């Protein structure tokens, strides 16, 4: 296509068409021919190890003229079918390119709605460097998404099989049913899509909500370190300054919101090991809260095996980030505590 006078030829490939769960992800790459020599070892992502793909990932981004990634999620796949959804993901990847392409080379699928010269070849990732580069970007990006989805929907092993139809994935479906990111129109998933099998999610955030007692702001005092803390949030924030006067000042403050403001005051840096210990301190506070309040413990038990999610766009670490891509560590800790307390005699 370069011989035909096209300067910005985008190679396009996708990953995830055959998976049972998660998005289909497409990438588009326009090579910078002056830097193409740095990509001479690049070829089809399926022939590379995860380590090799991760090594090439930044090299490709730095060596190309433009790159873009697009996806279609499980709900879009169910609504329109996998082939139209794959084309949609490719459209989105192309739209992300800057500068835009003037021609396309695509692995297998043509894009009839795009008015650009294009060539589609089976196994194009084995004959076109730009398509091979796109296949690596798409694969690495999708693998990372699936690792994040395992945090949001634990128990399926998405971080290992990436949503594909392995024996372990099938056994997980039998045990806990399908979840939000499963492709419910795919035949292997259909037996697990009725109400009995779909894994329930419980979202919480505001203390006034149905499960507001799960919030660290909920007014349930806890006893730790020989002292009474008005909320688990008070305890958590105070431990940033353990042994300092500020620890006691935070404990005595009237509301958890004030405790948060004091704990986040950049003029007062936290203990040097805070990043290493903060998860365990949160576990300690949550366990104390539900151990010391039998009524809360029963509410927690009533959720059975539901996925617990702190649903807020304001927190991508303890919450889900509002879009499901956050770590949801508070939800995960609540589920850990639920299982731990169930085992107590």
Image (cartoon, helix red, strand yellow):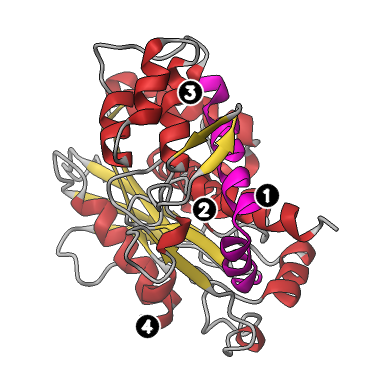
Select label 4 or label 3 by which is in front: 3
Tell me: residue 104, above or below residue 35: below
The disc at residue 331 is 2
Say left or right for 129 vs 199: left
What residue sits right under mark 3 in the picture? 239
Residue at 66% from the left image edge and 88% from the top image edge: 191
- Distance in Å between CA atoms under marks 4 and 3: 48 Å
Of labels 1 and 4, earlier in sequence is: 4
- Distance in Å between CA atoms under marks 2 and 4: 29 Å
Element assignment for label 4: helix
What residue sits right under mark 1 in the picture? 160
- Bin the neighbour count of mark 3 within 10 Å (Cα to Cα): few under 14, some 14-19, many 20 and up: many
Rendered location of residue 33, percent (x, y): 29, 26
Of labels 3 and 1, earlier in sequence is: 1
Instruction: Give the magenta part as a residue range.
Output: 275-304
The disc at residue 111 is none
Residue at 36% from the left image edge and 82% from the top image edge: 80
Select label 3 or label 2 by which is in front: 3
Select label 2 or label 4 by which is in front: 2
Was residue 303 drawn as part of the magenta stretch in this picture? yes
């Amino acid at each position: 296509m370069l011989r035909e006078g096209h300067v910005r030829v985008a190679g396009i490939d996708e990953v995830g068409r055959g998976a049972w769960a998660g998005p289909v992800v497409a990438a588009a790459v326009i090579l910078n021919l002056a830097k193409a020599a740095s990509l001479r070892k690049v070829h089809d992502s399926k022939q590379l190890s995860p380590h090799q793909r991760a090594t090439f990932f930044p090299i490709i981004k730095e060596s190309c003229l433009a790159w873009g990634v697009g996806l279609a999620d499980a709900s879009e796949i169910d609504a329109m079918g996998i082939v139209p959804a794959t084309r949609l993901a490719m459209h989105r990847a192309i739209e992300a390119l800057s500068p835009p392409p003037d021609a396309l080379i695509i692995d297998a699928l043509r894009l009839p709605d795009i008015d650009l010269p294009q060539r589609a070849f089976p196994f194009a990732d084995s004959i076109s460097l730009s398509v091979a580069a796109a296949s690596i970007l798409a694969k690495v990006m999708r693998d990372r998404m699936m690792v994040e989805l395992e945090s949001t929907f634990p128990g399926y092993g998405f971080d290992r099989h990436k949503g594909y139809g392995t024996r372990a994935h099938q056994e997980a479906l039998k045990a806990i049913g399908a979840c939000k990111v499963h492709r419910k129109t795919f035949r292997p998933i259909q037996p697990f899509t009725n109400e009995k099998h779909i894994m329930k999610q419980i979202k919480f955030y505001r203390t006034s909500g149905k499960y507001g007692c799960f919030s660290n702001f909920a007014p349930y005092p806890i006893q730790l370190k020989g002292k009474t803390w008005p909320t688990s949030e008070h305890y958590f924030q105070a431990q940033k300054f353990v042994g300092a006067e500020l620890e006691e000042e935070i404990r005595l403050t009237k509301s958890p919101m004030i405790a948060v403001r004091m704990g986040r005051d950049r003029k007062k840096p936290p203990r040097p090991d805070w990043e290493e210990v903060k998860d365990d301190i949160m576990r300690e506070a949550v366990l104390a809260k539900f151990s010391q309040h039998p009524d809360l413990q029963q509410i927690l038990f009533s959720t059975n095996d539901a996925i617990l999610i702190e649903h807020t766009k304001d927190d991508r670490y303890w919450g889900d980030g509002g879009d499901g891509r956050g770590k949801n560590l508070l939800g995960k800790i609540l589920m850990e505590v639920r299982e731990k307390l169930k085992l107590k005699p």
